[in-house]
Amino acid sequence: MKFSKATAALSAFAVSLSLALPAQAADWPPIEAQAKGQTVYFNAWGGGEAINAYIAWAAQEVQSRYGVTVKHVKITDAAEVVKRVQTEVAAGRTSDGSVDLMWVNGENFRNLKSAGLLHGPWAESLPSWGLVDLSKPVRSDFSVPTDGYEAPWGTAQLTFIADKVTTPTPPRSAADLLRFAQANPGRVSYPKPPDFHGTTFLKQLLLELTPAPAALQQAVTPAAFASATPALWTYLDQLHPHLWRAGKTFLASAAAMHRMLADGELKLSLTFNPNEAANLITSRQLPATAYSFGWTRGTIGNVHFVAIPVNARAKAGAQVFANFLLSAPAQAHKADTRVWGDGTVLDTSKLPADLQAQMRNKAPGALTELVPTLAEPHASWVEALEAEWLKRYGAR
């Protein structure tokens, strides 16, 4: 990907987009003026080459258009950023924090919001908000109302990856996966919670195995946890002996799974981006025979967001960058599987035909089948699941 070509393409979109964009809020020009010259420290996961390249492109665009400098602070776990914000505010650092904008959702958003550690509300005042598809869960994050304290950035769905050469028929359910692992000992694994992908895999299993799925949409209680999770632990007790290293050691990340899939050590990998396999094929990190698939009854999907901590020093610059990330050109560029392939949060019917076509572009390896989207459990289930998993299996 070359910035010059991407920038030229975006310039060509400008005229066609001008009619589609909503009128700016009256207070937006002063925010843009205040943002000019600011440096935004954007704390975002840095484990994906395509994502890092996209953020670098977006940073260059915002510097050129608005005079805002964006520094990508590459992180591995958003929970660590939450702790940093909590520590800074507790120490009296209330206006010059180290984080200006962060990629966040789920329990991390809930923890920040409940502690009053977010700036806002601001998200629905962005000029780009008028293009957002309100039929998507953009106002609720793992069943927690966003209330304008975070702006949607993209959509995601748990997706599995295999190689047609070694796995022409993939497992399509939790029961299938158990049988598959039994038939292929040592060739299946998953990331160790609290790694995001590992925890998501646990939630996927729980949604399929629990006798009370409706309870997962409410805040967790000891009674609800005790009722909903026994089937999950029974399943994992059956699955783990057949995993890589007999389930006594787990992988650090989905990226490690991708490498082991490419090397033939594993037969399956997983991702939260239905188009990531296409990116990995393009970069020759997976063979051309890799493909994406889902489970018959569906897989977990959600919206991911960006939020501004209450003690951010560049709040105006953070809003300008968030507004650009939400804009039609940036969303179209991001949705292109040749760039990142992250799903859009915009109502595509409001966009020009050329941008709609760009968003529909699919490269080999991307998920092409229709997989039902399952709602995320309430954010409070994450910490409870991780704590119990670590208690049962983490010390092995």
Image: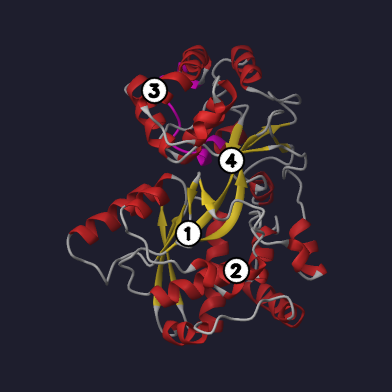
> Which numbered dot is residue 137?
none
Task: Please state the extent of the stretch shown in magenta in the rendering.
Answer: 244-257
Q: For mark 1, what is the residue?
A: 147
Estimate the spatial distance between the alpha carbons at disc 1 and disc 4, rounded to whole Å.
29 Å
> How dense is the environment of label 4, judged by Cα within 10 Å: few (below 14), some, or many (20 and up)?
many
Instruction: Say what secondary structure mark 1 lies in.
Output: loop
- Kind of residue at disc 2: Trp
User: Residue 129's x, y, as percent?
Assistant: 60, 68
Q: Earlier in the sequence, mark 2 or mark 1?
A: 2
Task: Kindly indicate whether the residue at mark 4 contacts the one at mark 2 (C-beta within 8 angstroms).
Answer: no
Q: Is residue 342 left or right of residue 348?
A: left
Q: For mark 2, what is the residue?
A: 129
Q: Residue at x 70, y 32 (%)?
A: 163
Instruction: Say what secondary structure mark 3 lies in.
Output: helix
Name the mark nearer the viewer: 3 or 2: 3
Instruction: Say what secondary structure mark 2 lies in.
Output: helix
Name the mark nearer the viewer: 1 or 4: 1
Vertical placement of 59 versus 139: above or below? below
Q: Is residue 289 magenta?
A: no
Quarter of the image containing the N terminus? Answer: bottom right
Estimate the spatial distance between the alpha carbons at disc 2 and disc 4, rounded to whole Å.
28 Å
Q: Is residue 146 left or right of residue 288?
A: left
User: Residue 366's x, y, as percent?
Assistant: 72, 45
Vertical placement of 158 versus 170: above or below? below
Q: For mark 3, what is the residue?
A: 223
Instruction: Say what secondary structure mark 4 lies in.
Output: strand
Q: Is residue 251 magenta?
A: yes
- Kind of residue at disc 4: Thr
> How dense is the environment of label 1, judged by Cα within 10 Å: few (below 14), some, or many (20 and up)?
some
Q: For mark 4, what is the residue?
A: 271
Residue 160, picture quadrant: top right
